[in-house]
């Protein structure tokens, strides 16, 4: 099962882009039949994966709405670009009591 609904939506979006661009390859007139066959096979796999992701999204959504699953909220605590967390190179460790 996926981490979150957002994670699944992100994966589906990426999958849709790959499908779009793979279909584009099938329309090219400057490539041979081997290239088109490769793209046709890849497109089949991409569509199956995309369908799986959509099915998982639907199941997760139903479980959340039905109260079977409660999504966790993961907070991000970023330390970079926050001067409170900068370590000075010449700083000596402080003793803790």
Image (cartoon, rainbow, N blue to C red):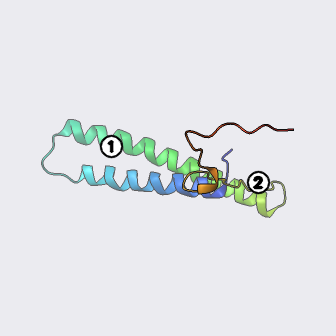
- Estimate how packed mark 2 is, as few (under 14), some (14 to 19) or many (20 or more) residues with alpha carbons within 10 Å: few
Front in this rendered view, residue 88 or 26: 88
Tell me which label, 2 or 1, sits earlier in the chain: 1
Tag 2 residue? 72
Pair 2/1: label in front: 2
- Residue visible at 44% across and 41% down in the picture: 45
SS at mark 1 in the image:
helix
Instruction: Say whether marks 2 and 1 touch (CB < 8 Å).
Output: no
Tag 1 residue? 40
x then y, percent, for residue 63: 77, 56
In the picture, residue 16 is in which quadrant? Answer: bottom left
x then y, percent, for residue 14: 46, 53
- Residue visible at 33% across and 43% down in the picture: 40
x then y, percent, for residue 74: 71, 53
**Vertical relation: 19 (above or below) 40:** below
Which part of the image, by quadrant, shows the C terminus?
Answer: top right
């Amino acid at each position: 099962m996926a981490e979150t609904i957002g994670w699944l939506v992100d994966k589906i979006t990426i999958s849709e882009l790959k499908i779009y661009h793979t279909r584009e390859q099938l329309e090219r007139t400057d490539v041979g039949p081997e290239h088109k066959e490769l793209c046709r096979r890849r497109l089949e796999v991409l569509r199956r994966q995309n369908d799986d992701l959509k099915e998982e999204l639907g199941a997760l959504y139903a479980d959340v709405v039905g109260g079977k699953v409660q999504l966790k909220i993961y907070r991000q605590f970023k330390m970079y670009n926050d001067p409170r967390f900068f370590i000075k190179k010449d700083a000596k460790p402080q003793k803790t009591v």
